[in-house]
Amino acid sequence: MEEEYLRLQQCIHYRFSQVKHLATALTHSSWANEQVEPCEDNERLEFLGDAVLELCVTEELFKRFQEAHEGQLTKIRSKLVKEKSLSIIALELGLNYFLRLGKGEESQGGRLRASLLADTMEAVIGAVFLDGGYHEACSFIHRLFEDKWPETFKIETSKDFKSKLQEITQDVFKERPTYMLTGTKGPEHEKIFQVVLNLPSGKTFEAEGTSLKKAEQTAAATAIVYLNSQKTED
């Protein structure tokens, strides 16, 4: 088994003391279910790796961007560890060539499916954690994201008024705004949602939209205009 995965260990720049962890990380449930003898798939390792990845990335962002507040750090972390980002890293490492897939999953293109690749990447991180501990897992994660850490915590959010408003209220009030659905109107196929946005200051804004999300975005945009006008008056 060690010989089989030697090239992959060279690619990921980590040498397992127990290669069985790597083998499990690359074992999809579809393959495990086809075996005569019971075989562990990578789902538990994926669960573990997800937690280790989030903690390590959070710790690194906390150290890198000491001026950033919670909302900004959360946004950067989400972008780094989202399915698309992890699947790209998995392809860069060549994990897809070493996956153990069942016949059905193989025939349906599972080897290049983003969700499957992202899950496998998390499972490999979990395997490194089991094999070498948190320090080794973090070093591994840092290598994975070496050229992917953002240079600044200020991510453009002009189209996402809710995120922008949260950043403003965190800075000004040290609290987040709250949204409440107050009602709906119109027929089922043309329903209009009505919401009220409450700022930490007590100021409220009402808005409507063809979906709850759109109504909240409209309310947030109105609140941003109001807060910016208050700055100008000050």
Image (spheres, rainbow, N blue to C red):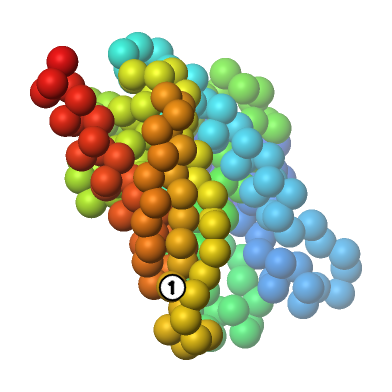
Residue drawn at x 15%, y 15% is 234
Residue 135 figure quarter = top right
Q: Position of residue 44 (x, y in %)?
A: 74, 49
Answer yes or no: is residue 80 visible.
Answer: no
Residue 83 lies, with reference to residue 106, above or below; the image says above
Residue drawn at x 56%, y 23% is 136
Residue drawn at x 70%, y 55% is 43
Q: Which residue is labeled 1 in the image?
A: 192
Q: Position of residue 54 (x, y in %)?
A: 54, 34
State the residue in front, 50 or 131. Answer: 50
State the residue in front, 136 or 159. Answer: 159
Answer yes or no: is residue 170 visible.
Answer: yes
Q: Is residue 166 left or right of residue 116?
A: left
Residue drawn at x 88%, y 68% is 37
Q: How many marks?
A: 1
Q: Position of residue 17 (x, y in %)?
A: 66, 31
Residue 168 figure quarter = top left
Helix, strand or loop at label 1? It is strand
Residue 6 lies, with reference to residue 116, above or below; the image says above
Q: Position of residue 63 (x, y in %)?
A: 40, 13
User: Mark 1: which amino acid?
Assistant: Ile
Residue 124 lies, with reference to residue 137, above or below; the image says below
- Crowdedness near tag 1: few (<14), some (14–19) or many (≥20) residues, C-alpha within 10 Å: some
Farthest-out residue, left: 232
